[in-house]
Image (tube, rainbow, N blue to C red):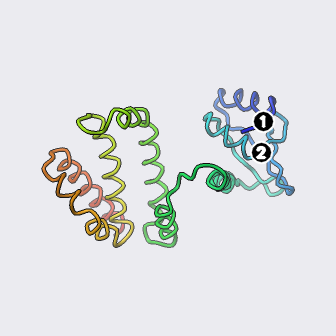
């Protein structure tokens, strides 16, 4: 993330600590202007602000429209194109398939909640992976997250459950005797029930 001005970074931190969202204006020439630091910045600067938990809002300088969503999407596209890809092709296909689906309205809140849960537990999950998931009490966190994702996929994307059953019958059989898996199944069933009710 080279090329950041000291003014941009110091202004970002100052406003971020105060809890006020920084206003970023995007001009027709695609330049981004940080009104807090009175300096032009780049998408890399905005990405760094996100990592530092600095709140900002991007407005079209001419119309005043809030274009924060499209700018954040552009940052993700640039990161995926230039860095290590984090979004699997299968996930992208499933996500695209949800556009226009009757369950589309539920996807944003589900993804946001899943990411928040992962972020809150990422340190524990990392430690669990480093020490080995077997016989580790933290493994329940990982298994719960995965169970939630599988349960939602079963409801939101038709056919996923059948593909998973045919692809991994041995894994399912090996885990059937575990009491924690039974608890996860109950959680999955409860989630599916709630999703079914919302889809009616």
| Secondary element at image label 2 | loop
Left or right position of 20 against 106: right
> Where's the N terminus, which quadrant?
top right
In the figure, residue 136 lies in which quadrant? top left
Which residue is more in the foreground, 65 or 51? 51
Residue 132 on image: x %, y %: 32, 36
Q: Nearer the viewer, residue 114 or 167?
A: 167
Can you tell which mark lies on residue 98?
none
Decide: marks 2, 1 in contact (CB < 8 A)?
A: yes
- Residue visible at 43% across and 32% down? 123
Q: Residue at 15% x, 46% y: name it.
A: 178
Task: Pick whichever of labels 2 and 1 is earlier in the sequence.
Answer: 1
Q: Gap in Å between the C-alphas at discs 2 and 1?
A: 8 Å
Q: Say above or below: 128 vs 60.
A: above
Picture quadrant where residue 53 is located: top right
Please tell me which residue is depicted at 74% across the width and 42% down the height of the picture: 23
Left or right position of 112 against 11: left
Q: Nearer the viewer, residue 13 or 176?
A: 176
In this picture, residue 132 sits left or right of residue 44: left
Up the image or down, 173 lies above or below 120; here it is: below
Marker disc for residue 42? 2
Q: Position of residue 81 (x, y in %)?
A: 65, 56
Say which element carries label 1. loop
Residue linked to disc 1: 4
**Where is residue 133 shown, x and y percent of the image?**
30, 39
Direction right: furthest residue: 29
Q: Give the class, few, some or many, for how many residues have Cα within 10 Å of label 2's Cα (few <14, many ≥20).
A: some
């Amino acid at each position: 993330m080279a090329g950041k001005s000291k003014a941009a970074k110091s202004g970002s931190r100052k406003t971020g600590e105060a809890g006020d969202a920084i206003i970023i204006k995007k001009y027709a020439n695609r330049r981004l202007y940080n009104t807090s630091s009175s300096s032009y910045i780049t998408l890399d600067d905005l990405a760094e602000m996100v990592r530092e938990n600095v709140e900002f809002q991007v407005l079209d300088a001419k119309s005043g429209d809030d274009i924060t969503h499209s700018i954040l999407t552009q940052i993700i596209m640039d990161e995926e194109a230039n860095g290590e890809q984090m979004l699997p092709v299968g996930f992208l296909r499933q996500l695209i398939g949800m556009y226009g689906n009757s369950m589309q309205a539920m996807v944003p809140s589900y993804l946001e909640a899943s990411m928040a849960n992962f972020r809150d537990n990422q340190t524990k999950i990392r430690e669990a992976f480093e020490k080995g998931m077997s016989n580790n009490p933290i493994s329940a966190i990982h298994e719960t997250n995965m169970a939630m994702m599988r349960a939602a996929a079963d409801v939101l994307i038709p056919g996923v459950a059948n593909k998973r059953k045919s692809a991994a019958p041995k894994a399912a059989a090996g885990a059937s005797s575990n009491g924690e898996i039974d608890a996860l199944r109950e959680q999955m069933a409860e989630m599916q029930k709630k999703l079914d009710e919302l889809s009616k």
